[in-house]
Amino acid sequence: MTTHQYDVAVVGAGTSGCYAAATVADAGYDVVVVERKDAEEAGHIACGDALKGASDFPEAIPKSQLEPAFTNTDVDHGRFEIPQEDTVLEIPVPGELAVIDRWEYGRCLIEGADEAGAEFHYDTVVQDVLQDDTGEVTGFEAIRKGDPVTYEADIVIDGAGALSLLQDKADFEDATFDTNVRYSQFCSAYREVVEVEDPVVWDDALVFKPTDRAAGYLWYFPRTDTEINVGLGFQMNEEPMELVDDLKADLENRAEFEGAKVKDKLGAALPTRRPYDSAVAPGYMAVGDAAAHVNPTTGGGIAGAAYAGQYAAEQAIEAIEDDRTDDESVLWEYNVNVMDHFGARYAALDVYNIFVTAQEVDDLMGLLASLPATNLAEALYSGSTNVGLGLKLKTAIESFGHWGLIYDLYRTKSLADRLLSHYEDYPDDPSGFAAWKRERDAIMDDIYETTGAEPKY
């Protein structure tokens, strides 16, 4: 069996994996990225193609290197179609938006990491994780182009995506690494890229539409005014949806898609849950989808994944230089940086996901149609929003018939703010982790009681 040795081994050539590899390589360390797809297919990932935070990427692979994949930079708002209320909401989205060609974006990422000095091994499928007697991850076994191969590394960075095989194979019993992970915390999604005959009138908007059940939505994101990423997803704690058939049925009822041609189709699972409480273990860190670094209300995760990759690489470098790769406390700063940058916000947003699962879709759509667009945007992307007395009175009038639901929403908002504040006090080292989790779980109990939702964790 062939054995390869590296300072850092990264599994998965996605956003977080490529940024991690580029950061490590820039620092002068040996790093390999193993990718299950072949060189031509690498970077081809099921994605909605919408990118929030399009102006902000780590320097290891700068935005300028990714811009060839930006196909529509004129999108500036969300368009929420609510057929139950016969209305459309135009909702501002804070920050810079873009729609991208995800495959081309994937190629740009790989090129950037390659130019930084990372090595890529394609056609490589991980089979098992290697750990020593203390539990430290020391590498993994894989099949590369049909042959068994072993990778030994001081640090393994898991960018293998949602429901990563590495996490199934590793023993984290004595680590802080979050193992409270279930299928019900994930979403199943399907998307097609279609070409329409005439330009769509909403080429400056990200279009969202509810599915027949509350825990899911359809999307229509314009790569250009005639090339549209269309898809839908549903929470895995719901009864399964026939994703392809449901999407096809909606497309057939939209005049702008008459005669449309399908150019690409893919499905995937993605996390719609809070970020992992801890994504580190001795010799090991998880990044991107593999650590639930995704906005749980929208499914967007590109910008967060890029920074997660950088933060993990920085801690890997520090641990290697200190010869302490077996020490979680050295890797812990990675957790802190993630929570400080976006993790706390995503955890608060998950509260609204929990709220939605306990409601009827018609009630939710009626309430949604009555809420001010600016505050909806704040809630969707920041995890909180300011609601003054005047706004409460105005909303109360316009939401007549939904007062019970809106009262529950305000109570839920208060709990989301409380949870956000708690995450902003994420412990600086593992010694405070157990107490922090106990208090967080007490807040979650109040959230379940208020929303009436089934416990998610």
Image: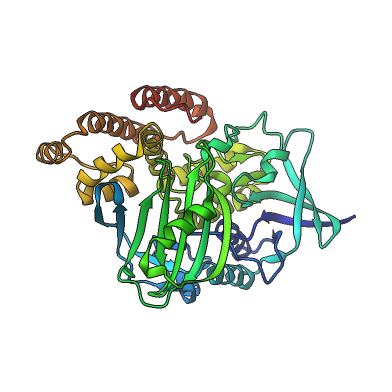
112 on left or right of 201: right
Rendering coords of residue 350 (x, y %)? 41, 39
Q: Position of residue 124 (x, y in %)?
A: 76, 59
Nearer to me, 52 or 202: 202
Using the rendered view, name the quadrant where residue 451 is placed: top left
> In this rendering, is residue 237 above or below 379?
above
Viewer-nearest residue: 157 or 275: 275
Residue 348 rendering spot, x and y as whole percentages: 37, 38
Check the image and report above or below for 189 versus 122. Answer: above
Residue ID at (67%, 29%): 173
Observer able to see residue 287: no
Name the colour scheme: rainbow
The answer to whether residue 4 is visible is yes
Measured as percent of width and height from the top left, residue 200 is found at 34, 72
Task: Report how many numbered discs are placed on residues in the image.
Answer: 0
219 relative to 166 in the view: left or right: left
Which quadrant holds the N terminus? Answer: bottom right
Q: Residue at x 60, y 40 (%)?
A: 280
Residue nearest the viewer, comparing 296 with 359: 359
**Residue at horizontal 44 percent and vertical 35 percent from the top:** 426
